[in-house]
Amino acid sequence: MSVTVKCPECNAPLELPDDVPAGKRLQCPDCGAAFAPPGAADLSSGLKTAPARPEAKGRAPAPPAAPRSRSRPRDDSDRRDPDRAPPRRGKAGSVVLLLSILVILLLALGVAGIVVYSYVDDLQQRVAEGKTPPPPPAPPPPGMGGMLPGGMPPGGMPPGGMAFPAPGVVLKIGDLAPEIEGTDLDGKPMKLSEFRGQVVVIDFWGDWSPSKSPYPYLTHLVNRMKGEPFVLLGVNSDPTLDRAKQVAKGQKIGWRSWWDAGGMQLSGPLFQRYGVTMVPTTFVLDKKGIVRQRYTGPAVEILLDRAVDETLALGENRPADAPPRWHPGSTAHSQLADEVEVGPYRVRPPVGYTLEKPTTEAGRMTYRWKGQPHPDGGVPEFVVSLSPAQPPDKKLEAVLEKDLQAISPNSRLGFSCSAAERGDVKGLTFTRARWTLMEHPVKFKAVGLLYAAVDGDTLIRISSRDTMPTFNGPQDAAALSFRKAAK
């Protein structure tokens, strides 16, 4: 009778006789492993032990078993392929990273600008107080003809028309403007103190600078202030006098200017005297020659217009109940054409508007300008009418209410109007209001402005109408330009 056992190494079945002697070790014919049969007693201790596993001939020892992990087993799909491309970052992550970099750069540039500005401002103040002597200009390299490599003038000129000469003064608001005496671009004598009693705007300019003066706006400012105690003067810093004359002729500059010999370095005596380190720089002087405003860089129209009007109003003896002098509050003055006569008055209509033939009806004189037609067929209008004033016309709000009713006589449904407000411009007290007419809640039918004023025995009405929902800036500015003609 035989007994079947299995090899503990390769699990091969072996048939043995049932009378195998105790302590005898068996050898597997398949893998060659030697082992004791199950239940055999150990000869040395007499205890039953697990069969030993001697190493098979020619076989390498098995590596120790890896510690068992509690996480789920990973298959081949979880293993990273070294040749596989790294995962791409999502679009949202890339945008956030880019925005973060831009914010950091902007903050760094802002901090650097503040530091540089503070240093330059402190240096100018110390020079003005006499605590720090102005640094001497560096001599140009030999053989460069007074210019640095690349055509840069001595002292340097950063982009934007900036220069940093040693300022002789730091002119502040409230200081008396230094005297300027010399000749204008045409060689005629000119002295700043000759213009006392007028509001003076001095524009330090140079056509060589990328930040040029707004020539069209300054021209319209001069036209707007005709008949007022006002004058615009310039100080030019172009390299040569001939160049300054060419620019004045090409840009149709009608105001007079001095030429400062400092050129692009802004080191001329006039720029030094006023402490100007950038072109353009604009000063507003009152009638006594006191500095009331200073603007560095191109002056925004609404700022300079308001500053000029406020300076004109200084010292005026106005009645206690008089309305405040009107401030334009619009940047549309440069969108107006030249003045035209309207009876004994003058007005500047919007650019591109054409005057039709004036009409007279029942003593009422009407001047009508029309603009370019819109795609919807609507045509903008600007109208000035003059008629004899009646006693009730002294109440300007009542005149305005009557004109508003004529715009929408049947119903006020879909019609809105801002509250009437009073102002004073060019010596005329007027009342104005804005109105809007709707076809339905989301579609405009027309928008416009109304002005009413009384000048002696003349009632003045100014109105504008347009089919587009625009800001009405040019029409508003044109109405504010209305004034008496100089006798």
Image (cartoon, helix red, strand yellow):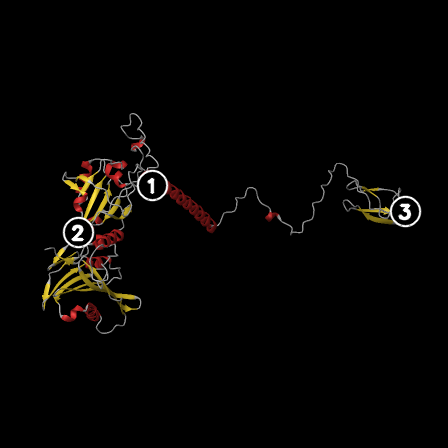
Q: In this view, does 258 lie above or below 444?
A: above
To which residue does mark 1 refer? 125
The amino acid pointed to by label 1 is Gln
Q: Of residues 113 and 375, which is closer to you in this image? A: 113
Give SS at disc 3. Answer: loop
To which residue does mark 3 refer? 19
- The reply to whether discs 1 and 3 touch (Cβ–Cβ < 8 Å) is no
Give the residue furthest to the bottom.
410
The amino acid pointed to by label 2 is Pro
Q: Which corner quadrant holds the C terminus? A: bottom left
- The reply to whether discs 1 and 2 touch (Cβ–Cβ < 8 Å) is no
Label 3 environment density (alpha carbons within 10 Å; few <14, some 14–19, many ≥20): few
| Position of residue 41 measured from the top left corner of the image (x, y, whole percent) | 88, 46
Give SS at disc 1. Answer: helix
Q: How many marks?
A: 3
Q: Which of marks 1 and 3 is nearer the N terminus?
A: 3
Is label 2 or label 3 in front?
Answer: 2
Query: Could you say which quadrant of the image residue 188 lies in?
Result: top left
Q: Is residue 358 visible?
A: yes
| Position of residue 52 measured from the top left corner of the image (x, y, whole percent) | 81, 43
To which residue does mark 2 refer? 229
Q: Which of marks 1 and 2 is nearer the N terminus?
A: 1
Q: In this view, does 7 lie above or below 407?
A: above
Q: Of residues 291 and 43, which is closer to you in this image? A: 291
The answer to whether residue 135 is left or right of residue 381 is right
The amino acid pointed to by label 3 is Asp
Q: Can residue 466 be seen in this view?
A: no
| Position of residue 405 measured from the top left corner of the image (x, y, whole percent) | 21, 71
| Position of residue 293 measured from the top left corner of the image (x, y, whole percent) | 27, 49
**Mark 1 to mark 2 CA distance (whole Å):** 34 Å
